[in-house]
Amino acid sequence: MTDSLISMRNLDFLLWEWLDLDGMLSRPRFAAHGRADLSIMLDLAHELSKRELAPHSRATDSHEPTLDEHGRVKVLAQSAHAVRAMSEAGFFSTVFDEARGGLQLPNTFHMAAMGVLMAGNMGTASYVLLTTGNARLIASFGNDAQIAAFADPQIRGQTMGTMCLSEPHAGSSLAEIRTRAVPDGEDDLGCRYRITGNKMWISGGDQDITENIIHLVLAKTAGPDGKLIPGTRGISLFIVPKLLPDGTANDVSVAGLNHKMGQRAMPNCALNFGEGREQPRGRAGAVGWRVGEIGQGLPQMFQMMNDARVAVGLSGSILAARGYQLALAYAKERVQGRAAQGDAQVAIIEHPDVKRMLLAQKAIAEGALALTLYSAHLLDEEQTAPEESDRAALLLGLLTPVTKSWPAEWAQEALHQALQIFGGVGYTRDFEIEMLYRDNRLNPIHEGTTGIHGIDLVTRKIRRDGGAAFAVLREKVSGSLTRAAGRPALETGAGAVSEAFQRLAESVDRIIAAPEERRLLANASAFLQALGHGIVGWLWLDQAIACDKAIEAGAVGQDLSFYSGKLRAFQYFAEAELPRIAVWANQVNAMRDVAASMPVAEF
């Protein structure tokens, strides 16, 4: 129906016209690159996505990874080939320093390129994001020897990485982990330990694409009395490779595979550390090297966790965008029913309710993609704009739970509308849309459920800093409202954004002043939804300003239709979506307690 997996025109707009990537490339870190270089690489990503990833997308869904008789995970051969192609093209190395063999490109561009690859095959492309997050953590906190041994091969795409946090009994409650690390001397790589324990839900925990896998493992260390330090204070971070530097196998084994509803291209494993073979010197346990100081594991891992959370937001936005592309193409081709006046049958896109569903998808998908790229842009601001670094970090901290959760939740709504447009055929495996619907259902769960991120938002990102990060957001929104003033096409939508943030500010004050934590936590998810809608509404306003200026400058033809379509999506979001904030805000402001106070017996 279409040879474009994603709207490259919209991506160009977001990068160059809205986020001003040209201006970012003028900074010293990125000065070796120009727009032409990045445009070529983005086109390469699209070609790879169409040629290497999309053709086996359905096959990876139908033929999920398997565990052979030797306990090794086998993935689809086409998936392995595509990962190697992405490696050869340099997509594992985009954000890393040139001194480490990287391309030293902006995080904003990296996320855009990843989005294009994910549009072809979500699971296969995700190997890149997981590995770059692992390598970036080691490059940030590891010593020189660890970086050379474990990060550099990932940057070159020669090996891949994981993050091993959750355990079968603990889930997201990391303070309760039981995996243990016992000192085992020192060597050229630093403080060596023996790791024993079990990890669950490990994406890419084993695969046969690369010979080695670098596991980043959270484990508890013992205090002077030999007992495990309780809570999160005793959690340290360890590099535990599948193969040791001398090429021998480490004591890491796959206990089993988790069979997922969607996103099946990447295996999800239960792993055992230190429960099999004995290692040299007769000591039991998998060999690992501590990263940084004892007790710093969780703060260090938050870097990779936050990278992964933005990646989940990207996943949701891309699945919504892909669903929109498919639904739009189908609606233009599928002839059914007649217009209000006339006898000839028409394509279903001519029916008003189908237009409504398409516009809702466009508003969600393009709004979600803007949110994820803006979050990546804030990371670039934090790293390369000294005068904006602190404010960018504060704002990124506030946006991260929203960036993870809003695209994940609302992509499901967008895909619901896409499936409705396909009708009965969309419910069958003959069409891609049912697979996308299943693929996205993971996103509201992994890297922390929506409820967990609501709690994080109200407790850490609002109450703990007294609303300081929200104040930075209000300044940004006020700037956009000022730039929108005097533009008649934006007046109604700008008014809706202004009203939304007035309501959100009232909720922030209520959250900060709330005396009872139970009521606060009972309304955390409502505030997360409200803030997400408000932020996406603001980002739509900001995009609309750029579109209105382009029309004012004389855009014609397809460009005029593109800008006008985005203005229409902003108008729809302002009219149909922003009013929802009032309901959520009222719930927060009243600190409703009907659910939290309900006795268990009444359920």
Image (cartoon, rainbow, N blue to C red):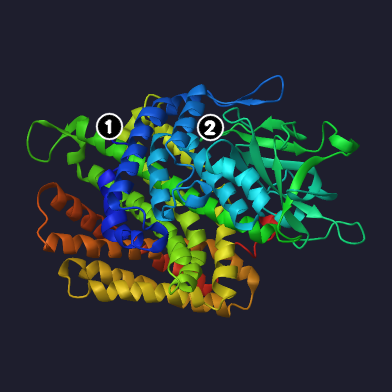
Disc 2 to disc 1: CB gap under 8 Å: no
Residue sitting nearer the eye, 54 or 430: 54
Side of 126 relative to 342 (left or right): right
Indicate which label's residue lies in the foreground, 2 or 1: 1
Residue 278: horizontal and vertical position, in percent? 85, 33
Upstream in the sequence, badge 2 or badge 1?
Answer: 1
Q: Is residue 473 above or below residue 145?
A: below
Q: Residue at x 35, y 49 (%)?
A: 365
SS class of the residue under badge 2?
loop
Give the amino acid at mark 1: Asp
Give the amino acid at mark 2: Arg
Residue 454: horizontal and vertical position, in percent? 55, 61
Side of 407 relative to 77 (left or right): left
Residue 483: horizontal and vertical position, in percent? 25, 73
Residue lying farthest right? 225
Q: Which residue is mark 1?
A: 3
Residue sitting nearer the eye, 157 or 73: 157
Q: Residue at x 69, y 60 (%)?
A: 599
Q: Residue at x 52, y 31 (%)?
A: 265
Count neighbours of disc 2 (C-alpha within 10 A) and say few if under 14, some if 14 to 19, many if 20 or more. Answer: many
Side of 504 relative to 50 (left or right): right
Residue 201: horizontal and vertical position, in percent? 65, 41
SS class of the residue under badge 1?
loop
Q: Do we see residue 113 in this rendering? A: yes
Q: Do we see residue 527 in this rendering? A: no
Question: Which numbered tag is attached to residue 264?
Answer: 2
